[in-house]
Amino acid sequence: MSSPVIELDDVTKVYPLPAGDVVALNGISLIIDEGEFVAIMGPSGSGKSTLLNQIGCLDRPTSGNLFLDGKNIREMDDRELTDLRLSSIGYIFQKFNLIPLLSAYENVEYPYIMKHRKNDDTGRVRDLLALVGIDENLSTHKPNELSGGQQQRIAIARALVNDPAILLCDEPTGNLDSQTGAQIMEALSELHKKGRTIVMVTHESEIAAYAERTIVIRDGRVA
Ligand SMILES: Nc1ncnc2c1ncn2[C@@H]1O[C@H](COP(=O)(O)OP(=O)(O)O)[C@@H](O)[C@H]1O
Ligand SMILES: [Mg+2]
């Protein structure tokens, strides 16, 4: 039997703005089981990234509850949340969020150092860069010396460096040509086969087809 690893219970997210409140999530309830590969689809502005941010504990819901591994994140302090994020969750951001002053290699190594308090002497960073097709020469480049597709691949390697149980991907192939995109999707499918739980936001149905299940979001609600 599979068990719920992500559970949202009537989650709302409201952004208070001077012009009025923006209700980005409007009562989302859903359950994702351990080892599932789920796609989240919906039009632009429907709340997909906001939803992923809640699941990734980058933000806290305005109301409602989020359970990760059965634990209510409202009952966790900042340290517990940081540990959870570092050890259990890999996040691939829509806009990469690479650190500009660090090389490609150092960007991938960064969460490893945060978790292990030492440099990677296992070859893992190098192997992950190879997996996403970044050669040794490119790995010394800074993000602004790399194409969007290359930055995306580095962001993916970085998300995998601490071997997270849950992988959250926001439009993971959005900046890639279709061949590189297919390679990335094959890599995600491989990780899914090895037991990772994957939640992937996409607006492309060919990309969503790699997932086992699709959840459609419209106006901050499950459609
Ligand atoms: N930080 C923010 N401050 C104010 N409004 C926001 C913020 N982030 C997102 N929104 C608004 O919330 C809604 C959902 O946005 P988002 O989750 O980014 O949608 P999607 O990823 O589906 O395109 C949109 O109306 C967007 O303008
Ligand atoms: Mg988005």
Image (spheres, grey):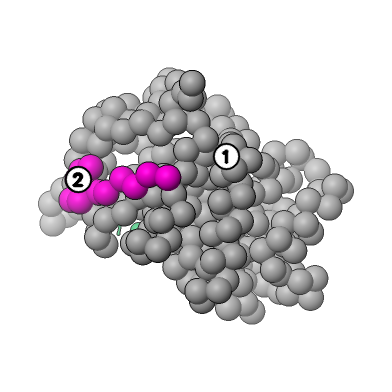
For label 1, the residue is 196
Residue 217 inside the magenta-drawn segment: yes
Q: Splitting the image into 4 quarters, where does residue 130 fall?
A: bottom right
In this orientation, which residue lies closer to the viewer: 19 or 10?
10
Element marked by disc 1:
loop
For label 2, the residue is 223
- The vertical placement of 101 against 199, above or below, is below
**C-alpha gap between disc 1 and disc 2:** 26 Å
Q: Which mark is residue 106?
A: none
Report whether the residue tagged 1 is closer than 8 Å to ligand 2.
Answer: no
Amino acid under disc 1: Arg
Question: Where does the image place residue 52, in percent across and percent down from the top left?
Answer: 39, 46
For image coordinates 21% across by 35% down, the residue present is 27
What's the magenta bit mostly, secondary-structure-wise? strand
For image coordinates 24% across by 60% down, the residue present is 43
Amino acid under disc 2: Ala
| Label 1 CA crowd tier, 10 Å (few <14, some 14–19, many 20+) | many
Question: Where does the image place residue 124, in percent across and percent down from the top left?
Answer: 78, 51
Report if residue 104 is visible in the image.
Answer: yes
- The vertical placement of 138 against 85, above or below, is below
Element marked by disc 2:
loop
Question: Where does the image place residue 217, in percent across and percent down from the top left?
Answer: 25, 49
The C terminus, quarter of image? top left
Residue 12 located left or right of residue 85: left
The stretch of residues the image draws in magenta is 212-223
**Ligand 1: quadrant of the figure:** bottom left
| Earlier residue among tags 1 and 2 | 1
In this orientation, which residue lies closer to the viewer: 214 or 122?
214
Report if residue 102 is visible in the image.
Answer: no
- The vertical placement of 153 against 46, above or below, is below
